[in-house]
Image: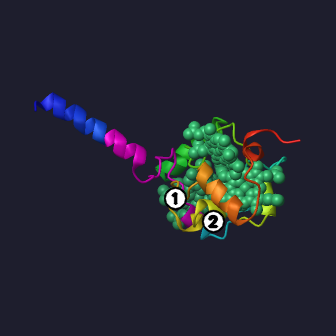
């Protein structure tokens, strides 16, 4: 087999691995660590608020970070980058870790009211320096919990706006 051909086959094998292999943490624009910040006593809800109607958890504004970092670690290159986003009034372009397609209906509020915990769907975030998709949020995973908790399995429950 010539070299170029072998290269193509290896590339194809790598692509298959990437599609089926373990989830890895994406490179974030700023190396923010949940472990480091949760250890300071910050609560999830200090940064992830759930505005009406309660579907999204949202990401904190740079002002939230700067409430400390205007004076903490100002010499760090990562904090200088954070401060420049803040100065330019640009949100940090965080790379999404957990995301479902827009045709699926999902509400954080409904699940928290039903007794769901952040860790159940996102893992022990407060122990992590970097986040990756360590918990499954595929349709199968939604269905498994709905079956166990006797919530609806109707297609329209998750795929159509309900009356
Ligand atoms: C000081 C603010 C802050 C606190 C406190 C915080 N987070 Fe975060 N969270 C962030 C930032 C910034 C990101 C984006 C960077 C990243 O993904 O690591 C993020 C990302 C996430 C994500 C990934 C979202 C996605 O789909 O991309 C989850 C899940 C999450 N946080 C859950 C939690 C939980 C659970 C707690 C409490 C244990 C918590 N966070 C506490 C700031 C915070
Ligand atoms: C029943 C499972 C479940 C629970 C419980 C849950 N999440 Fe999520 N979370 C998801 C799913 C699914 C998404 C992707 C939503 C999307 O793409 O619209 C998500 C997305 C996020 C995001 C990205 C922004 C957004 O809202 O899309 C953050 C941040 C987040 N979750 C934080 C939390 C925190 C903090 C808690 C606990 C207070 C929590 N989640 C509880 C399933 C869950
Ligand atoms: C309650 C105060 C507080 C808030 C709010 C806060 N941080 Fe921090 N942050 C700290 C402290 C304290 C450290 C650790 C400094 C040390 O001991 O080295 C730190 C460390 C960091 C570091 C590591 C810097 C380095 O070079 O070592 C980054 C990056 C960071 N924070 C980003 C963020 C981002 C992004 C946000 C907003 C989502 C945020 N922080 C919100 C207090 C805070
Ligand atoms: C931890 C278990 C669990 C997981 C995981 C889970 N659900 Fe649920 N879900 C529930 C329970 C319990 C209810 C509430 C049922 C009720 O109130 O009758 C619910 C309710 C819902 C509702 C109705 C919300 C409303 O407004 O009344 C939708 C839609 C839904 N889930 C979609 C999803 C999707 C999409 C996923 C996967 C991304 C998912 N769920 C994952 C347990 C779960
Ligand atoms: C509990 C919520 C829930 C229920 C109930 C549900 N789905 Fe889904 N469905 C999802 C989620 C979440 C995804 C997106 C999965 C992903 O992107 O990984 C999805 C994706 C899909 C897709 C696209 C799959 C693909 O590979 O592109 C189809 C088709 C689908 N669902 C059909 C159905 C049918 C048919 C039913 C009824 C038998 C059903 N769903 C019931 C949550 C649900």
Left or right, residue 63 beside residue 96: right
In the picture of the structure, the residue carrying the numbered disc 2 is: 119
Picture quadrant of residue 72: bottom right
Q: Which residues are magenta?
A: 14-37
- Residue 121 vertical position relative to residue 101 in the rendered view, above or below: below
- Whether 21 is among the magenta residues is yes
Q: As drawn, is 92 to the left or to the right of 63?
A: left
**The magenta stretch spans residue 119:** no
Query: Residue visible at 54% across and 55% down?
Result: 32
Tell me whether the residue at label 1 lies in contact with that at label 2, contact meaning CB atoms closer than 8 angstroms. no
Depicted 11 relative to depicted 132: above or below: above
Query: Whole-percent x and y of residue 94?
Result: 57, 44
- The reply to whether residue 60 is visible in this rendering is no
Residue at numbered disc 1: 134
**SS class, disc 1:** loop
- For the point 24% across and 39% down, the residue is 10
Q: Earlier in the sequence, mark 1 or mark 2?
A: 2
**What quarter of the picture does the N terminus occupy?**
top left
Q: Position of residue 108 (x, y in %)?
A: 75, 54
The answer to whether residue 132 is visible is yes
Nearer the observer, 43 or 133: 133
Scheme by which the image is coloured: rainbow
Q: Is mark 2 within 8 Å of ligand 1?
A: yes
Q: Work out how far the residue at label 1 is from the one at label 2, CA to CA, in angstroms.
A: 10 Å
Helix, strand or loop at label 2? It is helix
Residue 114 position by quadrant: bottom right
Residue situated in front as seen by the camera: 135 or 66: 135
């Amino acid at each position: 087999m010539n070299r170029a051909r072998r290269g193509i086959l290896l590339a194809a094998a790598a692509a298959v691995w990437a599609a089926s292999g373990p989830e890895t943490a994406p490179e974030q624009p700023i190396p923010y660590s949940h472990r480091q910040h949760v250890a300071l006593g910050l609560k999830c809800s200090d940064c992830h608020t759930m505005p009406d109607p309660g579907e999204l958890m949202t990401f904190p504004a740079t002002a939230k970070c700067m409430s400390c970092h205007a004076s903490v670690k100002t010499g760090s290159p990562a904090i200088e980058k954070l401060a420049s986003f803040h100065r330019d009034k640009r949100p940090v372009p965080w790379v999404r870790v957990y995301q479902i397609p827009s045709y699926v209906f999902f509400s954080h509020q409904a699940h928290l009211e039903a007794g769901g915990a952040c860790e159940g769907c996102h893992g022990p975030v407060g122990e992590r320096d970097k986040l990756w998709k360590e918990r499954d949020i595929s349709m199968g995973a939604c269905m498994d919990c709905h079956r166990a908790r006797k919530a609806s399995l109707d297609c329209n429950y998750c795929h159509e706006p309900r009356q």
